[in-house]
């Protein structure tokens, strides 16, 4: 029986397998036909959680993909091929789904017979979608959980996934939970984040950082060195004194009008002077577009909530949330027994996979200087992170083998799709992300 290294690719919100076609192509070119390899690569592009199904939440998406992995493993075994090594790469929402999937697999003892190897994400909101000090961000935080069903609630961390009411994003980053424990089993953990121009998943969440050093890169004097071999990938960066910072000369007013593009999808953008005609039609086009988008999102969210009610009622497999709930109940019972009988049997101090961590909030009052600093208005590119998100950042950055790569796509409207070359047939500029994918493939351990 030949050995197989199974790589699972998981797409993002509203996505489908075609979004990762170029990712699949690159990895097959680089690692698919390696001579003298004792193990052969098999790529599974997850398809059970696609299109409207991505509204159903990280957890239900993860359950579907985990079942798809089990089925693929069984099918390969029937062909005389045994999965002995396992890797997963998730794009956008798919990265969060991947973190859930490995928890499900670890709970079912999958990694007792299969070696975890590579865990990668590209432009994934690891700490959810953070708030920013802007009106658009406030509106998104209000509408997102309502229009994106369960996934929206989990993106914006307003869900109460844990039996004790914690958001799933926080649970995924808890060192005492099985998701985190599964993640640290992987010897190669590498995340890719867009440093700039990602309007969908900002740098702070994809790069797991409390601050954004690239938010004002044109003015703050940051020095960036790029990889020579991998286009648009940052090799290193460092801040320089503001006195050495360079600023661009301001454009004349007529040049700004000539070079301005309407913030529309690339297929609808136009050069001067047609851009002026598009501007003139915006008062008509924009309200129509917003109304159609809201109607579609509301309809699909309604359908998703109906699916979720059906899934909850007819699910036969015990889900991970139920297992964690039982562990928490057992922990509470043990705590009550200890309170009633302090001299009883000691409770183990080792971490329990389903245990809720103790409240680590400090009772020390902040100084006047700290209060003044916290009350000062942050710049618009710096996030307003919650204590839970800050804890996620700390926990994830404590993983010793975590490596971060940053892509820098200047001059694009939204770099979120570019980083995976999502649709190069329709948008040629998406191919600019191929250098990032080449780096990922070259550093993929077979």
Image (spheres, rainbow, N blue to C red):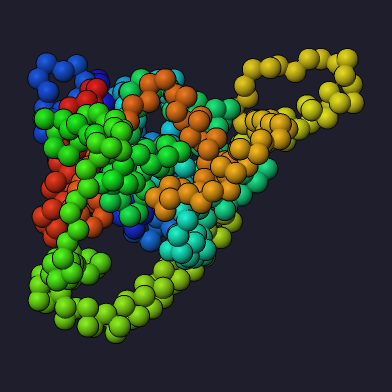
Find residue 351 and report its image quarter.
top right
* Location of residue 88 with respect to 293 vertically, above or below: above
Q: Residue at x 31, y 78 (%)?
A: 286
Quadrant occupied by the C terminus: top left
Question: x, y percentage for residue 77?
Answer: 30, 29
Res. 48 in view: no
Find residue 66 and report its image quarter.
top left
In-front residue for pair 153/110: 153
Instruction: Report the side of 435 relative to 403 (left or right).
Output: left
Instruction: Report the side of 151 relative to 425 (left or right).
Output: right
Q: Residue at x 33, y 81 (%)?
A: 288
* Location of residue 375 with respect to 439 vertically, above or below: below
Question: x, y percentage for residue 367?
Answer: 66, 35
Res. 399 in view: yes
Q: Residue at x 16, y 30 (%)?
A: 227
Question: x, y percentage for residue 196?
Answer: 28, 47
In-front residue for pair 314/249: 249
Instruction: Report the side of 220 relative to 173 (left or right).
Output: left
* Location of residue 102 with respect to 214 vertically, above or below: above
Q: Residue at x 47, y 56 (%)?
A: 133
Extreme-front residue of the structure = 243
């Amino acid at each position: 029986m030949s050995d197989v290294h199974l790589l699972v690719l998981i797409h993002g919100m509203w996505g489908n397998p075609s979004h990762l076609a170029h990712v699949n192509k690159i990895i097959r070119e680089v690692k698919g036909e390696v001579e003298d390899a004792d193990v052969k690569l098999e790529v599974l592009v997850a398809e059970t959680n696609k299109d409207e199904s991505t509204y159903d939440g990280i957890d239900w998406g993860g359950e579907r993909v985990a079942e798809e992995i089990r089925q693929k493993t069984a099918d390969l075994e029937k062909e005389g091929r045994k999965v002995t090594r396992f890797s997963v790469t998730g794009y956008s929402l798919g990265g969060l789904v991947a973190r859930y999937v490995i928890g499900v697999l670890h709970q079912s003892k999958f990694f007792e017979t299969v070696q975890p190897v590579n865990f990668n994400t590209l432009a994934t909101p690891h700490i959810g979608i953070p708030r920013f000090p802007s009106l658009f961000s406030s509106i998104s935080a209000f509408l997102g959980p309502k229009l994106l069903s369960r996934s929206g609630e989990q993106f914006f961390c307003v869900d109460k996934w844990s039996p004790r009411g914690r958001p799933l994003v926080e649970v995924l980053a808890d060192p005492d939970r099985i998701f985190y424990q599964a993640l640290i089993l992987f010897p190669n953990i590498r995340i890719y984040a867009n440093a700039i121009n990602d309007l969908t998943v900002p740098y702070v969440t994809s790069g797991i950082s409390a601050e954004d050093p690239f938010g004002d890169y044109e003015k703050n004097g940051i020095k960036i060195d790029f990889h020579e071999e991998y286009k648009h990938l940052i090799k290193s960066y460092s801040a320089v004194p503001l006195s050495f910072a360079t600023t661009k000369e301001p454009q004349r007013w007529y040049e700004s009008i000539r070079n301005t593009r309407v913030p529309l999808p690339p297929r609808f953008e136009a050069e001067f002077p047609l851009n002026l005609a598009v501007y003139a039609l915006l008062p008509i086009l924009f309200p129509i577009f917003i109304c159609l988008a809201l109607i579609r999102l509301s309809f699909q969210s309604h359908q998703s909530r109906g699916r979720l009610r059906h899934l909850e009622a007819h699910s036969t497999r015990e889900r991970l949330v139920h297992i964690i709930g039982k562990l928490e109940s057992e922990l509470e019972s043990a705590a009550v027994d200890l309170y009633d009988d302090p001299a009883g049997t000691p409770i183990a101090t080792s971490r329990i996979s389903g245990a809720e961590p103790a409240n680590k909030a400090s009772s020390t009052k902040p100084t006047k200087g700290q209060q003044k600093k916290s009350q000062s208005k942050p710049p618009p590119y710096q996030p307003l992170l919650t204590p839970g998100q800050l804890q996620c950042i700390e926990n994830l950055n404590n993983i010793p083998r975590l490596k971060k790569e940053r892509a820098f796509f200047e001059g694009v409207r939204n770099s979120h799709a570019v980083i995976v070359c999502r649709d190069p047939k329709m948008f040629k500029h998406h191919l600019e992300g191929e250098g990032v994918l080449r780096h990922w493939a070259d550093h993929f351990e077979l």
